[in-house]
Amino acid sequence: MTENKRIKVIVPIPMDDAGVAARAEQLPADFVREGFAPEFVAVPWGAALGDSYHDTLLMDWTVFQAGVEAEEEGYSGILIDTVSDSGMRALRSRLSIPVVGPGEAAFAAAMMLGKKFTVLTMWPEWFPLYEKTLTEYGWWDRVASLRSIDTRPDVTELLAGKEEVIFDKLKAEATAAMEEDGADVIVLGSTTMHQSAKFLDDNMPIPVLNPGQVAYKFLETLIELGLTHSKVAFPAPEVPKDDDIRKGWY
């Protein structure tokens, strides 16, 4: 029997098993291709909400810490469970297995499906996360807008129990993005919003991308094709600091 290819899915916020399970629901069993096994693992310490440059730094560092040994641990790839793509480029530098972030994957998919996309998120405190990545990727000319419903997120319980209010707010902003900003594709701004993806896609005349699912399927495809990131683009460090990284500060 062929052993499943394990994928390490790194949750960038420390949380208990129930919180990790809620995030893992974005990849139901029938969505995962045969022969693959995603394993959700939360960082043991770090940021709380990703709402500041303080938290952005912690997310980059703790996701990097959590992923730096993944190749040695036998994983075939890493999926970062945040549209901020925290730690992605540093992990690509250190590892040879593919490392995929939902932001880069979903934005790229949006550009294939339309001409202009809007990032629709929970609150404006997350805008700097997209501003950072979109600037790094050089994709601002394909962005219609960044929009939020100005609602404080719950990164552990997600949208459970709040669907009736949250879903309508998201639909209203998505409609405004299409009618006022010229968006022809919507990208959800957080993997924590995955519970709203089907509702929005069913109720909008334009594609609504669930970034965690898009990124996961892209990672499966890379692994099946035997492809990974270019080490010319993401060169390995001449002097790795693995022992210092493992020590951590927690």
Image: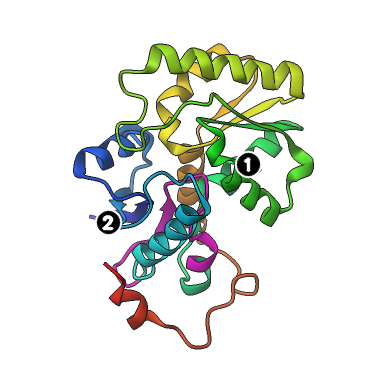
Circle 1 residues within 10 Å: few <14, some 14–19, many ≥20: many
Residue 85 within the magenta-colored segment of the rendering: yes
Where residue 140 sits: x, y (%)?
Answer: 75, 44
Q: Which residues are magenta?
A: 72-91
Q: Residue at x 31, y 66 (%)?
A: 74
Instruction: Of the two numbered discs 1 and 2 on the same chain, state the one appearing first in sequence.
Output: 2
Between 67 and 245, the one lying in front of the other is 245
Give the SS element for disc 2. loop
Is 234 part of what is drawn in magenta?
Answer: no
Amino acid tagged 1: Phe
Residue occupied by mark 2 = 2
Q: Residue at x 21, y 38 (%)?
A: 18
Nearer to us: label 1 or label 2: 1
Residue 29 is situated, as x and y percent measured from the top left of the image, at: 30, 35
Does residue 30 sit above or below 244 in this rendering?
above
How far apart marks 1 and 2 lie (CA) works out to 34 Å
* Element class at badge 1: helix
